[in-house]
Amino acid sequence: MVTSEAIDIFANLPLSIAFWLVVAVVLLYLARTPAHLALRATGRAVYNGLRLTARSVQLAEQGLAVRNRDVLLTAGAESAEREVEREFERIAKVVERDVAALPSLQRQLAEQVTYLDEDYRASAEVPPPSPGWVKAVAAVAELSGKGDTPVSSILEEIHRSTAAQHDSALAEYREAVAERHEKLDRMMPRWRRVAVALEQTGKKTTALLERTRLIDGHMDRYAEVRAGTDRAERVLTSSALTQFFISGFVLAIAVGGAAINFNLIALPMSEMVGGGSYIGNWKTSDVAALVIILVEVAMGLYLMEALRITRLFPVIGQMDDRMRVKMAWVTFAILFILAGIESSLALMRDRNAADLQALRQSLASVEPVHTQTSMIPTIGQMVMGFILPFALTFVAIPLETFVHSSRTVLGTGLGLSLRWTAFVLRLLGNGAQALGELLVDVYDVVIFLPLWIERRFFASRGNRGARNGHDDHGADDLAETWPDDEASDTAADQEFTPSATKSTNASESEPVGKEVLS
Amino acid sequence: MKRATLTVLLAVLLLGGCADTTSHSTAVYMLLDTSGTYRNELQRAQKIIDFLLATLQPGDSLVVARIDSGSFSEKDIVCKMTFDGRPSVANQQKRQFRETIDEFVISVESSPYTDITGGVIQAVEFLEETGAGKRRILIFSDLKEDLPAGHVRDFPLEMGGCSVIALNVTKLRSDNVDPREYFARVTYWETRVASGGGSWQVVNDLDNLATLAAN
């Protein structure tokens, strides 16, 4: 500890302080070069260290980004494959159904076409009208009124018989035409049937074409994902983020349901495992209730896996169908039993609560209130206790989405944080280097007086040298006096000047200390 | 993966449960002063006991004992019960407990002396035997000790971590003349309990019994 007595060597404090200041300035002036070097070296060391760290973090971020991209594209490709597969399954079902109906349709059409053909042929066989008859009858009728009587009577007779035959032929003709019309009329429903059958076939074909267009869309997407385009990556990332938040929201709802379920069975569970025992800091009854709910959730997961609705456990999905169906039944049975237990516990809870209420009323010296008890709350609790386990089963679907999308979201978040870390490290490195330079300048400010004297001294020497025919400057003399100092300072300045380093820093393989200062 | 997580969770819970040997139950020992005119205050004590019965959980213990001329005796225990772990059975036990206390309050007779120290020693001994995690001694008394000739009670108490709550510490006629007597009495007991390793509290507002539950 330096005391004022130790400083005060002249028994005059201001004088002593001034003396010590002069000593300090002289010492600092003498130590200027190593001090500058030390300050710059420290700044450079911190700068280099931080730049190296930033570079490592940046490389890690790049590696993570590549990995994220791979995972995202793989997941997207799997999803597209699954969708295409599902579409093909649907098409297969449609085609199978429609192809099975094709022989029947063909037979139907062939029958209708045969009927139509027959009717058409039948309607075409119409006796042609005989226009000659009409002319002959008219001619005979004209002749019958002219000439002599016998001929006339003969002609009249001919005319009469001809007219009768004409009438008969006309009647037959009309009858044939009517029959033809009747046959043509009978063709109408057959045409309609054919039209309907063809229309149905057309609709089915159109539906198939639409499905093929869907498949084309999926295939295009799949191709994009396989090609690893930026657009596919953007779409997949956006989709993963959306799914993450939606599934998170649904999971939060499910957690709420589980909490209600827990409250429903925690109290009556103490009747089974005792209310006074603890596991750690938790009541055994609470832990038991929690375990039951977790087991229900687990059974729900297995059930969904066995039904191939989710794909969290590939082992279950890869089982042979018989075993898988068995497993589905077993998990459903366990769920059913647990739902029954919960329902019973809900009933017990209602009774326990009523008993406790009665006890508290008696302890409070209050006459028990005999209200008309309704069974509705009890039944409601029992129904809730039965339904909630099955409702929790469907947690598997958002959980799967959440797990898959969280990989992408977490990866993206981690990449972003790494990028920011690298940026902050670079900023700190540059700050450290700038601080070193600032300290060098501050150092010179403290010893400005000896520096000024030195500059004046060398300037006067320089003038003398000029007069002696030399072309040197004070700065050159300074460089002679402190060769190491100026050389190192100049080198350092050049090294850290952005314009100087830009040309040397074209590639990333250059030394870190020579990187651009931006 | 999910199965493994669940297994680990269960294992952690079980191991945590095995490692933790702390008792979470509560044992309450209530001393009722039956000396002189303080006997008339017992109806107020009944309310406190009812409150305790309403708040104690399955697995907890409750003992009610009287303070008479020589209280360091099991004979002074009016009723003691460790409630069953099953809530329905515990409720039934509480009803029986209350009936016993009701009968005691009606039939109790005043004792000529007041051996509070003997009752406290008995309480500490009993509570240690229960092994309960939280041990409380409730003293329903005016804290005026009056010992028969020959009884030795002026020795330091070993409270064994029990918390002592003095309830309904009424002011005597002499306290009204010189209130310092009241404060000296309370301080005397506080010092004895604290020096024995226990904690001390006075609750005179019996309308605000929530303080008991909070402690």
Image (cartoon, rainbow, N blue to C red):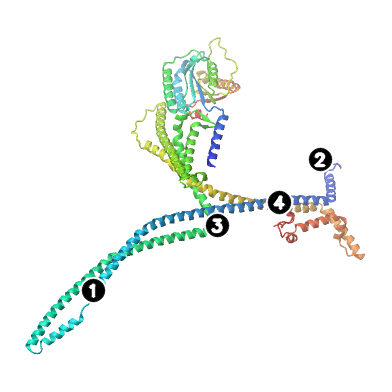
Marks 4 and 2 in Cβ contact (< 8 Å): no
- Give the quarter of the figure containing the C terminus of chain A: bottom right
Q: Is residue A326 visible?
A: yes
* Real-space Cα separation, disc 4 to disc 3, in angstroms: 35 Å
Kindly report the distance in space between the C-alpha atoms of the residues bearing marks 4 and 2.
47 Å
* Residue located farthest toward the right when viewing the structure as drawn: A468
| Same chain, labels 1 and 3 | yes
- Specify which label sits upstream in the sequence, 4 or 3: 4
Q: Of the numbered discs in the image, which one, if any, rests on residue A4?
A: 2
Indicate which label's residue lies in the foreground, 1 or 3.
1
Q: Secondary structure at mark 4?
A: helix
Secondary structure of the residue carrying numbered label 3: helix
Marks 2, 1: nearer the viewer: 1
Looking at the picture, how far across and down is residue A320, in whole percent? 48, 45
From the viewer's side, name the closer residue of B86 and A335.
A335
Q: Please tell me whether mark 2 sits on a helix, a strand or a loop.
A: helix
The quadrant of the picture occupied by the N terminus of chain A is top right
Indicate the amino acid at tag 2: Ser
Q: Are marks 1 and 3 in contact (CB under 8 Å)?
A: no
